[in-house]
Amino acid sequence: MQILYVEDDRNSQFLVEQILQDKYDVDIAPHAKDVMTWVKLKTYDLILMDIKLDDGYSGIELTKEIRKLNDYKNIPI
């Protein structure tokens, strides 16, 4: 299973990576501005989204943008 974790907090990144790394392929996106590029290059089975991101985006806005892509209309976010 391919998981994208969108999170700007390093402690949260570390914790989730430690919990999931042995069972899943996890990519961590620390910057919201990079996420749209990532989801266009790779199809993820699940996206874990932070709601409040530090670079001017909200997780809700970013989720709406991702949902516009055909490959992500039904992917859990």
Image (cartoon, rainbow, N blue to C red):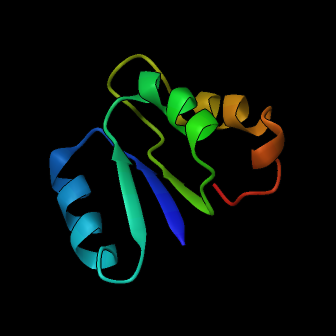
The residue that appears at 81% across and 56% down in the rendered structure is 74
| Vertical comparison of 17 with 68: above or below | below
Q: Position of residue 5 (x, y in %)?
A: 42, 52
- State left or right for residue 29 relative to residue 38: left
Q: Position of residue 23 (x, y in %)?
A: 38, 83
Q: Residue at x 15, y 54 (%)?
A: 11
The single residue placed furthest to the bottom in the displayed view is 23
Residue 66 spot, x, y in % from top left? 68, 35
Q: Based on the displayed image, in which of its 4 quarters is residue 77 positioned?
A: bottom right
Left or right, residue 71 beside residue 8: right
Instruction: Quadrant for the N terminus, please.
Output: bottom right
In the rendered view, would you say 34 is above or below 24? above
73 left or right of 18? right
Residue lying at 78% horizontally and 35% vertically, measured from the top left:
69
Q: Quadrant of residue 63?
A: top right
Q: Is residue 67 left or right of residue 24?
A: right
Q: Nearer the viewer, residue 46 or 57?
A: 46
Q: In this rendered view, identify the residue nearer to me: 22 or 8.
A: 22
**In the image shown, does 55 or 71 lie closer to the viewer?**
71
Q: Work out whether 44 lies above or below 33.
A: below
Q: Residue furthest front?
A: 41
Position above or below: 43 against 34: below
Residue 67, quarter of picture: top right
